Image: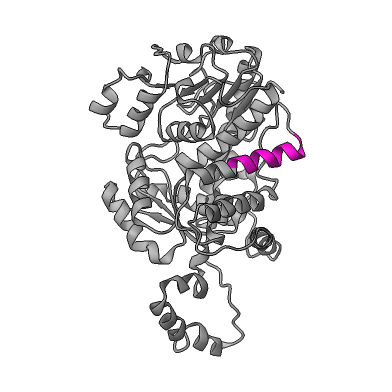
Amino acid sequence: MKKATVEELLAKAYKPSKLAPAYHKFYGGKIQIMTKCIIRDLSDFDIWYTPGVAEPCRIISKDREASFEYTNRWNYVAVVSDGSRVLGLGNIGGAAGLPVMEGKALLFKYLGGVDAFPICLSTQNPDDIITACKWIEPTFGGINLEDIEKPKCFYVLEKAREKLEIPIWHDDQQGTATVVLAGVLNALKLVGKKIDEVSIAMIGAGAANIKCADVLELAGVKPGNIIMVDSKGILGSWREDIISKENDPWKWKWAQKSNAEKREGGVPEAMKGADVLIAMSRSGPDVIKKEWFTLMNTNAIAFLCANPIPEAWPWEAKEAGVKIVGTGRSDFPNQINNSLGFPAIFRGVLDVRAKTVTDEMCIAAAVELARFAEERGIDEDNIVPKMTEWEVYPRVAVACALKSIEQGVARIKPSKQELWERAVKIIREARESVEALIKAGIIKHPPPEEEILKAT
């Protein structure tokens, strides 16, 4: 790994932030609605609108499920947020969170062929958010909850899943857990350790790590082997502040079932003897000290996922003896990125018109992500697929669709081959349409980077 200077790394880390305002203003946003039906002349509107449109309306009024066939509902996903915990910005509200939700919709379309729409709310009341999701359900085939603060996000996810009959997904929870599990599976193969035997230190006890713990347990990790740390220290059954002051039953659950050794202390105490470290805390560096990595077990694995700067520099972990290091960034090896998961998972559940999305589907997606990387070759610096390897997305989509069918939540049951051909076609066309629009000059090139950087 090339060891860059801190100044070079910081310049690279903050370059997107300098370019983003100019790029966003230049395009006036990142997504738009494009016509998909033929328009030969104005008489076609007699079919697409009045009077012809009345007939599909009558069909749907007699059978609500027909909306998946006569409209684009089969491919619509709402990206719903109250803006209460946006990226590293905190509670900035729905309007300020809109650029993020548009970005999410862009990734949905380009990577998964999913038509996603940002729905930013003017309420931060959890029951109102659930009601809003219920109100828009007739339009969408799925809902992606995004950037909602914890513990509210857990409540909204659980209740919305109970009340709606379309997949409800919280990417900060389930998406993160999916890609983390994929990385863990392949990293453990390389170091020769078994998932049901390893000790895992989890730094940060927010939505991401709580769901990571849930999914890791479902995949075979013993809950007592997990040591989780929040800003006040290691979680344990004595931490009554979690339930009395934070009112967080989801975190309290892990305070009860994790940490079988009853360890106390902070981050270094949690890392002692750990085989795997999963950090989802705050931007570094120096959140995790270099010397603390020496406390970990031999052939250790560390995922340092804070953005824009990981909790520690990857080379520091390597120099301290860690075998495999991953981060959330693309300029370091082993990027643990949600974008590997959610576009394909939604592609899969949409293609069978699933009524829900489950943690078992997260595991199916993680296993397929890991398998794809293993088949093309893995090593210490290459344990998960890259976003440029677009062929992974149809594979993950099919895995999730088949799991939906297996769990009895799919409205339709295409064959594996039919699912594969459909996913490949939709995803390929989404990418090719962008390339065609750029080539035709409809999507224009932005101003040169040098001009923007010079002006900032």
Q: Position of residue 314 (x, y in %)?
A: 62, 22
Report the quarter where the C terminus lies. top right
Q: Is residue 56 visible?
A: yes
Q: Position of residue 178 (x, y in %)?
A: 54, 39
Q: Residue furthest right?
A: 376
Q: Does the stretch in magenta take in 375?
A: yes
- Between 402 and 9, which is closer to the camera in this rendering? 402
The image quarter containing residue 12 is top right
- Between 114 and 374, which is closer to the camera in this rendering? 374
Q: Is residue 364 left or right of residue 159?
A: right
The image quarter containing residue 376 is top right
Residue 365 in the image: above or below residue 406: above
Give the residue at x 54% y 34%. Answer: 219
Q: Position of residue 73 (x, y in %)?
A: 48, 67
Residue stretch in magenta: 366-377
Q: Position of residue 424 (x, y in %)?
A: 68, 58
Q: Is residue 456 visible?
A: no
- Between 320 and 307, which is closer to the camera in this rendering? 320
Give the residue at x 65% y 13%. Answer: 319
Q: Residue furthest left?
A: 244
Report the quarter where the N terminus lies. top right
- Main secondary structure type of the part rendered in magenta: helix
Give the residue at x 50% y 57%. Answer: 28
Q: Is residue 41 left or right of residue 91?
A: right
